[in-house]
Image (cartoon, rainbow, N blue to C red):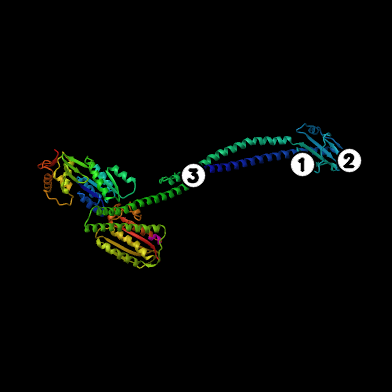
Amino acid sequence: MRVLIAEDDASLANTLRKALREEHCAVDVAPDGDEALHLALAIAYDAIVLDVMLPGIDGWQVLERLRAEGRHTPVLVLTARDGVADRVRGLNLGADDYLCKPFELTELVARLRAMTRRASGNPAPTLTLGPITVDTAAQRVRRGNQLVELTAREYAILELLVRRRGTLVSRSAICEHLYAEDDEVLSNVVDVHVAALRRKLGRDLIETRRGQGYIVDA
Amino acid sequence: MRESLRARLLLLHTVAVTIIVTLVGATLCYSYWRTLVADLDRELTLRAATIVGALSPAAPGRFDLALPQDTRDYFRMEAPDQAYYGIWTASGVVVDTSDPDQSIPRPDGVGAVTRGDRREVVVTGPEETLVLVGRDLSRVRSEVQSLALAIVPVGLVAVGLSFMSGWLLAGRALAPIARMSRTARAMADGEFDARVPVDRTESELGQLAVSLNTAFDRMHGAIERQQRFTADASHDLRTPLAALMAEADWALGRPRNLEEYREALATCRSAAARMSAIVEGLLELARADADDVPLQVRRTPVEDVVHEAVALARPVAERRGIRIVSQVERADVKADPERLRQALSNVILNAIHYNHDGGHVAVSAAAEQGLVTLRVRDDGIGIGEEDLPHVFDRFYRADKARATVGGTGLGLALTKWIVERHGGTVACSSEPGVGTEFTLYLPSA
């Protein structure tokens, strides 16, 4: 999952980055509104954690403009202020969920996952593709009844392809989904992972379209 | 309350008018009575003179009375105009009366007197005789009664008119008061932009309305500041709290190595330190509000205060490559040196925080017209026009999100409080993009 954290408090942003990385997310951090909007429009994030109090253009404006550009990226709004007014405003401007500071980290992660599940059109935590079962909450894959060991990246690619089943997913889209802006990416790393998936789950699972990308369940 | 005031005014007004009308009416009637009686007296006196003229002594104790015909007719009138006369000798023997069947009491002396229903005039005649002429007062009485009867309806109309006009006037006068009390109630209920409509500012009620509106404006302003303060304070405390909680959650989320735990504890510590600074600032301000802060005021050389404040700020400035220069005149203020230093430090730190790396801060102190002026000028980012009046408000930050810039947002509020407690004032001027100048005016020692 590729996540953008728009938060000006460096300490909190850092903690969130650490935590989400451990949940196998690729994380970018934007310390102000302008940067946040720029990144949100440039990259197809799976989720955005947006603090409403941002320097430069504030969180509300980032949200408004994002939605005005027709982006449906799920947004979870963070606020430290009192009151229903902020919550209502956030939801009315197009936020998908809301959390007040201070919050429990586990709750933030769970809400992010739920949000992205809803956005992908499949709110159920388990995806099925033939004999393959993907448990997105526990991040585990089964083949039949057998648990299959996958690395974090392999799992991420599989979940992405299964969520977009029937759709062609380009290599660059996979990279964008898997890696943060400041990660170093080797050019053929995706191929390596896909090969590993084929080994573990079956040759026929993922189809390669030369020069275009990968697809499951075509 | 309003009803009884109106009713009281009206009652007073009506009672006053009734009394006046009654007095005027009574005076009129009495005056008329007196006039009529005077006329009657003149008439009776005339008749008495005629009788005296008609009396001639005949023998000792005996008189002849030769009354003219009209006089004789006069005394033959029927009731209620009946007139009568009586003549007595000096020793009290009756000489003649108009009606022998009726006994007329002998008068005591000369003059005009009212006896019961009659008016009698007594004069002296030849040889000290007493001549009395009297007449019934019924006609006079009924004349006066007619007048009174004529006055009564007029009086009633007058009272009625005054009642109505009083009712209207009282209503018109009291309506603005009712409006004011409605507005006050609205304010009390939380409608903070309720104001009294003012149509004529010269009248007393107009003045009152203006004063009330001013008071309401102040109250509204104070409440808004309070609400903003609460919102800002909660935000500023919750942000480091969120960082602390998230880091603790992360550290406890799974087994970690020593380095990770150390890192987590360091992050928690710095968040706690941030909150601690805010809490300390809040406590200071709360004590200041409760006027609970003892100042140790003494003759303080202002150059010492400046030097100390600048020295404390230098390390912070150096980290950002910012230069601080100071230019100080020798002057003394009556101040608590530590507090004054604190006030100045907060301003200097502000100048550093909102400055570019490599910028400049100039601190100066001068004696001007009985005041000691401390100035802190910087060439930093400046403060916008909308933010300038709020710069000394608690937690106010021009760019509302600059939690990371440093400081608690309370420093300038404390500075203002300290300076004002010393009897001085603070001022701030700025040009965005160019720089800012803070001035602290203190009374010199």
The CA distance from mark 1 to mark 3 is 61 Å
| Mark 1 neighbour density, 10 Å: few (under 14) some (14–19) many (20 or more) | some
Q: Nearer the viewer, residue A179 or A51?
A: A179
Residue B421 inside the magenta-drawn segment: yes
Q: Please, what secondary structure does the residue beneath circle 3 have?
A: helix
| Rendering coords of residue B381 (x, y %) | 28, 56
Between the residue at mark 1 and the residue at mark 2, the CA separation in whole angstroms equals 27 Å
Query: Which circle's residue, 1 or 3, is located before the other in the chain?
Result: 1
What residue type is disc 3 on? Ile
Mark 3 lies on residue: B177
Q: Position of residue B74 (x, y in %)?
A: 78, 33
Residue interval drawn in magenta: B418-422
Residue type, mark 2 in image = Gly
Report in which chain the residue with disc 2 lies: B
Tag 1 residue:
B113
Q: Residues within 10 Å of mark 3 (few under 14, many from 20)?
A: some
The label on residue B61 is 2
Q: Main secondary structure of the magenta part?
A: helix
Amino acid carrying mark 1 in the image: Val
